[in-house]
Image: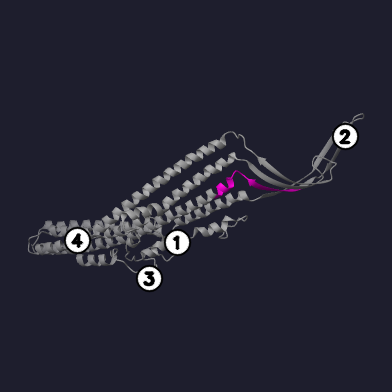
Amino acid sequence: MLRRVGRTVLAVALASAAPIAVATARADTLDGALVEAYKTNPALNSQRASVRSIDENVSQALAGYRPRAAVTATGGEQSISTTTKVPGANSVTQSGFNSPFQVGATITQNLFDGFQTANRTRQAESQVLAARATLAVTEQNVLLNAVTAYMNLLRDAAILELQKSNVEVLQEQLRQTRDRFNVGEVTRTDVAQAESRLAAGRSQLLAAEATYKSSVATYRQVIGSQPGRLAPASPVDRFIPSTLAKAVSVGITSNPAVSTAEFGVDAAQLLVKVNEGALLPNLAVQGNVQQSFLGIGTLNQLQSFNASVLGTLTIPIYQGGAEYSLIRQAKETLGQRRLDLATTRDQVRQNVVQSWGLLDAAKANIEATQAQVQAAEIALNGVREEARVGQRTTLDVLNAQQELVNARVALVTAQRDRVVASYTLLAAVGRLDPTVLHLAVQVYQPQVHYMQVRDAWAGTRNPDGR
């Protein structure tokens, strides 16, 4: 009975090493789960919002090229009393009330700021590219977590079925042992051994149920929907480089974590240039227009009009030393970012090598556990036959059954590890991407929002209408 049910479970739920054809992405397939996670995972959507926020850094930097305009108006009531001494005569006192009003407009255009605006713009663009690379890292993590959650649930569901089948077999074994005890073929000890093994099997079943429920909760958290009946999944070896050397090379050049660190170096280098710009001259031109009615501070002026266009050249000599400190600080940050880049490349190389080894081990483990299951089945059949002729005890039969259950559980775990290891290696080389996996989902394009806000001169509404 255990062999019959166990083979059914393995054939249906554990065919993960065999390729499957998926016509459309559905929620009960791995591709469907990845699509759901890609569209609805809150951590991924949060990172996308972060990228959109960083897009605004470019628009803010470009504002340094644009003119600044302001309108001012001044008005109110004033009371003035002025006593003036007149030579050769008595002093003259003038007093009164009026309501002065002034209105004016000022336009300022920066012409040269030590290349700070240009460098700030390039720095902001590097920050945008770094944010996109970070988004790619988050996408890979979310997709890998979705694969892990899917395969864990598939594994735990199969183990749960195996444990249920094991309990059924142990119940039948106990019934047969009691019948044999009633006719005097076995002793009370044999009955007690069967009862003990049944109790242990029920305990294992309860543990498997708890693990299964935990996996369901994790699936719901990562993928965003309740799981249905999960279909088998296949590895993604076809997307992985053929050799370890190629995998390491692709990982160092294509992994988005490396790209994030590279853009971090660019941004830090541009920050040095921005701070150095504070030591260069600054040139700006300002236009001013002002109309006054009843001058402020005087009772004699009825109306005046002023207009001017003035250029201002500022040559910094010494500003307290803070500008030099900022330059030194930026250079230290640049050195740190370069070290971070080297660390990231070493980490990616280590992850690729480690993932490659785990995948090789998972492939070999499947062959070993399949042989283990076959040997355990043969052993169980032999022990049962020997027990019928009195050459084996009930305990021998129970032990053989337990070894078969353990072998099937090991095979379930090995096949789960085989699929997860292939996706882990794909993520290590930087290719765990919806486009590479051919997922039926519209890929998020961060450059769309970037182009919408990059050259926006005014407006408080986001492109989505908020």
Q: Identify the residue under disc 2.
A: 93
Specify the quadrant that holds the N terminus. Answer: bottom left
Q: Farthest residue in the top direction? A: 88
Residue 25's image quarter? bottom left
Q: Identify the residue under disc 4.
A: 371
Residue 155's image quarter? bottom left
Specify the quadrant that holds the C terminus. Answer: bottom right
The image position of residue 379, as x and y in percent, is 14, 61
Q: Which residues are magenta?
A: 103-121
Name the amino acid, label 3: Ala
Q: Identify the residue under disc 3.
A: 23
> Is 14 situated left or right of 49 in this image?
left
Name the amino acid, label 2: Thr
Residue 206 in sight: no
Residue 21 versus residue 299: which sits nearer the camera?
A: 21
Give the alpha-carbon distance from disc 3 to disc 2, as whole Å: 99 Å
Q: Against 372, is 100 above or below?
A: above
Name the amino acid, label 4: Ala
Q: Going from the N terminus, do you reach mark 1 or mark 3 first?
A: 3
Q: Which mark is residue 39?
A: 1
Q: Against 46, is 6 above or below?
A: below
Q: Residue at x 13, y 57 (%)?
A: 395
Name the amino acid, label 1: Lys
> Is 440 situated left or right of 83 in this image?
left
Q: Which mark is residue 357?
A: none
Can residue 119 be found in the magenta stretch?
yes
Give the alpha-carbon distance from disc 1 to disc 2, as whole Å: 81 Å
